[in-house]
Image: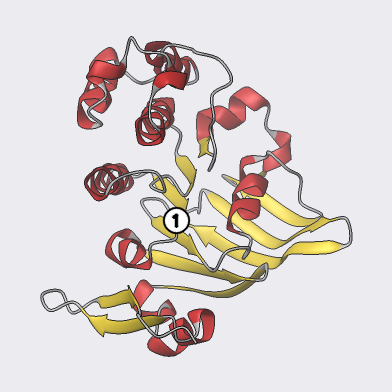
Amino acid sequence: MIPPLTVNQLSYHQGSQPLLQNINFAINPGELVGIIGPNGAGKSTLLKCLSGYITPSHGSICLFEQPLNRYSHQQRAQRLSYLPQHTEPAFGFLVRDIIYYGHQQSTIVSKQEINNIINQLQINELLNRPINQLSGGEQQRVHFARLLIQNAAIMLLDEPTASLDIGHESLLLNILSHHCQQGKSALIAIHNLNTAITFCDRLLLLEHGQQIALDTPSKVLTPQQITALYHHHVSVTHHPDTQKLLILPQRHQII
């Protein structure tokens, strides 16, 4: 089975400051991989490199065994989609137009499939509204719809649930997981560790721009690793039903 996305010895420097150092991994078809780590770990920088938004200082990124930089913009868009962390609209484009822009980059999505995505994400009533008049969570669902309609084999998402309530967070990630079960691959930067444990097949742990671990959630998020990353600001227990790790903020006295 050929990994659709392979990264070898990837590094990125901003001036003399290394933001990523020697990152190595491959994503398999049908896999949902979470990128986790403390603030400033390099999650967004890694996704920007993988999307082609910025150019790595060293190393290689291969998309279906071909270097990423050999693809034209259109060829890349047909294989890889990217939802950045901040998508603040500069103009009041209608939601309908933004969604159908994703359709222009995909030649195999039917109108029925587009309507299904719109219905699943509960954005029917937003179609004729300007994007800059929506809440942050509504905007995020619109941009996620555009990403799905683009129908690329690999989806890159940078904290797509940051502005969503828990109900819409669950909705978005269940839809994303469903698309991965249908053969797509996704790489998602995520802060909520409990959400990462629930939905991700594997976790890529970054700290200070370095790859600390890449494995299943139970092997990456050990109590020892969590304590090392977040010190004593969180407590680790197990969910009473699933027995999966449950990570909670810890209340303590500030002196």
Q: Residue 127 is drawn in which quadrant?
A: top left
Q: Position of residue 216 (x, y in %)?
A: 38, 73
Is 246 placed left or right of 84 in the picture?
left
Position of 81 compared to 45: left or right? Answer: left
Q: Alpha-carbon neighbours of circle 1 within 10 Å: few (<14), some, or many (≥20)?
A: some
Nearest the eye: 199 or 61: 199
Which residue is denoted by mark 1 in the rendering?
28
In the depicted structure, whether residue 50 falls above or below residue 145:
below
> Residue 69 location, x and y as percent?
73, 38
Question: Does residue 202 lie above or below 232 as drawn?
Answer: above
Q: Identify the image's colour scheme: rainbow, by chain, secondary structure or one colour.
A: secondary structure
Residue 125: horizontal and vertical position, in percent? 24, 17
Work out which residue is located at the far front of the displayed protein and give it.
255
Quadrant hosting residue 71: top right
Q: Callout 1, which amino acid?
A: Asn
**Who's the residue at 89% across and 62% down the image?**
16
State the residue at coordinates (41%, 20%).
Answer: 133
Tag 1, which secondary structure? loop
Q: Position of residue 77 (x, y in %)?
A: 56, 29
